[in-house]
Amino acid sequence: MRIIVTENYDELSKKAADIVASQLILKPRSVIGFATGGTPIGMYKEIVKMYREGKFSFKDVVTFNLDEYYGLDRENPQSYYFYMMEHLFKYVDIDKNNINIPDGRAEDIEKECIEYEEKIEKAGGIDLQILGIGKNGHIGFNEPDVKFEAKTHLVRLDEDTIKANSRFFNSIEEVPTKAISMGIKTIMHTRKIVLLASGKEKAEIIEKMVNGPITPDVPASILQLHPDVTLILDREAASQLNIK
C-alpha cells in the first residue's frame, strides 16, 4: 500500500487527477471506476482542466460508477448519474454508451446487479478504481459487516451514512435508505485502486484501515490485501498515521 500525503485538499485533487491522466495517456481505452461524494469533486475539476488542455481524450474510455441511490431516477439532482454529468461527463468527449452507472429505478434489482457485473466482465475488468471512504470505513456503499465476497448488490445504508449524506439533501428524511453498490469482491478485482481522503474527520478511520485488523467492521481494511493500492491523503486525514 502506497501512501501519498499532501499539504491540502487542492494538492490531493491534483495528485489524483494526475494518476487518472497517466492512466488515460498510457492506455486510451482504459476502463475507469469512478466515485462520487464531496472528496472527488476537486479531482474532477482538475481532470476537466487537463482535458481542455488537450492532454488526453475520453472517446475510447469506458466507465463504471461504484454506486447509485435506490429509488432515484437519473434526472434527480441528488442521483449519482446527475452528479457525474455535472462534474465530469458533460465536459469531456466520452461516448455516452460507455458510461455505466447502476439504475436506481430498475424494476428487477437482482437482474440489474447481475447485468452490471456482466458489463464489467465484458469490458475486460476495471483498470483503475477511484474510491472515497466513509467515516465508518465503507467503500462504495459497502457498510460495516458487509460480506467480503459480495459482488454488486442492494444495500441498506447505515444511520451514520444517511446522516453524513444528508448535507446534500434538503432534509435527512429525503436521503434514500438503500443503494446499489459494487461489492467488495468486485472492487478487489480491479487492477489498481486509488483512495482519496480529506479532513480531520477521516483521520481515525484511515488509521484503522491502514494499521488495524482486516475485518468487515472496517470494510476498507480489506484493501490491505490488494496488490496495487495508493492512498492520497491531506495532512489532516493522515494525522493519526506515523508519517512525517
Image (tube, rainbow, N blue to C red):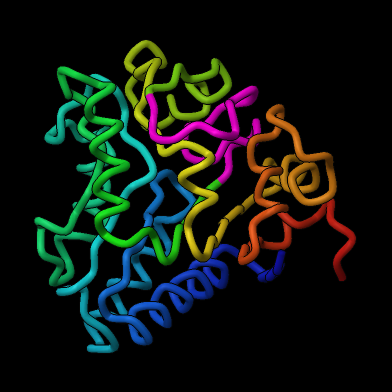
Residue 233 painted magenta: no
Q: Residue at x 56, y 72 (%)?
A: 11
Q: Residue at x 44, y 64 (%)?
A: 128
Q: Residue at x 42, y 62 (%)?
A: 42
**Residue numbers of the magenta segment:** 133-153
Q: Position of residue 227 (x, y in %)?
A: 65, 64
Report whether 240 appears left or right of 53: right
Q: Position of residue 117 (x, y in %)?
A: 32, 42
- The quarter of the picture where residue 60 lies is bottom left
Q: Residue at x 40, y 56 (%)?
A: 41
| Observer able to see residue 82 | yes
Residue 136 painted magenta: yes
Report whether 185 appears left or right of 1: left
Determine the main secondary structure of the stretch shown in magenta.
loop
| Observer able to see residue 232 | no
Quadrant occupied by the N terminus: bottom right
Looking at this view, name the residue that lies furthest to the top.
173
Q: Position of residue 152 (x, y in %)?
A: 39, 34
Count every numbered label the image shows and give the total: 0
- Closer to the camera, 177 or 65? 65
